[in-house]
Image: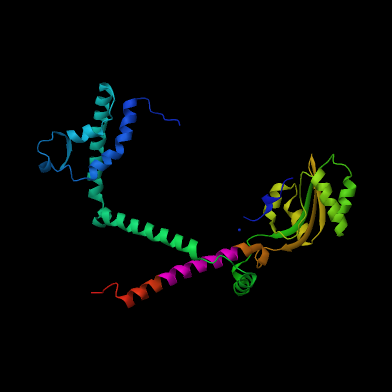
Amino acid sequence: MQRLCCFQKSYKYCPIGHKATYYCLLLLPIVFWATSCNWFNKNDREEDPIVAQVGEKYLYLSDVNEALIKGASAEDSIEVTKNFIDAWIKRQLILEIAETYLTPEQLDIERRVQDYKESLIIYSYENELIKQKLDTTVNDNEVNAYFEQYEDNFLLTEDIAQFYYVKLPKEAPKLNEARQMFQSNKAEDREQLMGYCVTYAADFYLKDSIWYELSGIYKQIPIDQLQLRTLSKNKLTGEVEDSTYIYLLKFNEFKEQGKPAPLNYIRHDIVKILLNKRKMELVSNTYENLYKDAVENGNFKKY
């Protein structure tokens, strides 16, 4: 049995041909490491042969030897060495240009990395705080109160409707009886129709508590927009078909675009809003209490 969920709101391949090139790619992080170290100061390594120089930066033989992969053939080692040196030179040339164009603030990488690290630590702490201490229970009274206060903030952006729906193959038995049960409002007929649909329907939905966007219905049922809107707006029963199926529709409620949304259509959104407010309040109160405790205990000084 399928569900009519489509109507519901949703408010090692490596293209490297040469082993040496592959090794070089593995070594690129080491090139970056070498670039950012102070080990390329010429005066610190007088006995270490220089293999490349860009501006005031030097690449030494020992750095290249450390980057070589043990067990590689002589041919591969030569190629890897060449590629390593070329990669280092290219990176230094790019860095020289970048340093020319960037402002001092942009070049202050250490401070920016520290700021980012601190932000990540605080973010992780806040998530853990929320996970451990946030009350995630939102009762109906809270939802209703928020909806009444901010109803005008939840205007519909398109038409929605509540309806019954059955999709039956044209060769299904007792189609006329199914039509009669579908149009009936009696509980026993609805129960019989449910059993019939479980056996014969390609798809059906017989609950009237869910709101659907009409734009989603257009995409799934062979019906033009005017006909669908007429049926839904006037709460009518209708039937359409294509070459394979018959579609039975019965509309119970209709809400027009631009009007306030029904509460049960946006309840989940309101719950999310209320929980988000609680999160912000929890974090804000925690930090405020932390600051007050620090003041009382003399844990910091201002100069």
- Identify which residue is drawn at 26% across, 54% down: 110
* Residue 73 visible in the current orientation: yes
- Identify which residue is drawn at 24% across, 37% down: 88
Prevailing secondary structure of the magenta residues: helix
* Residue 184 visible in the current orientation: no
Q: Is residue 204 left or right of residue 299?
A: right
Q: Is residue 141 left or right of residue 24?
A: right
Residue at the extreme bottom:
296
Q: Is residue 52 magenta?
A: no
Q: Nearer the viewer, residue 233 or 120?
A: 120
- Identify which residue is drawn at 31% across, 27% down: 20
Q: Is residue 139 left or right of residue 236?
A: left
Q: Tell me: residue 129, above or below residue 78.
A: below
Q: Is residue 104 left or right of residue 197?
A: left
Q: Where does residue 76 sit, x and y in percent of width and height?
A: 28, 24
Name the image quarter holding the C terminus.
Answer: bottom left
Which segment did they paint magenta?
269-286
Q: Where does residue 89 sit, x and y in percent of width and height?
A: 23, 37
Q: Where does residue 124 sit, x and y in percent of width and height?
A: 42, 58
Q: Is residue 270 magenta?
A: yes
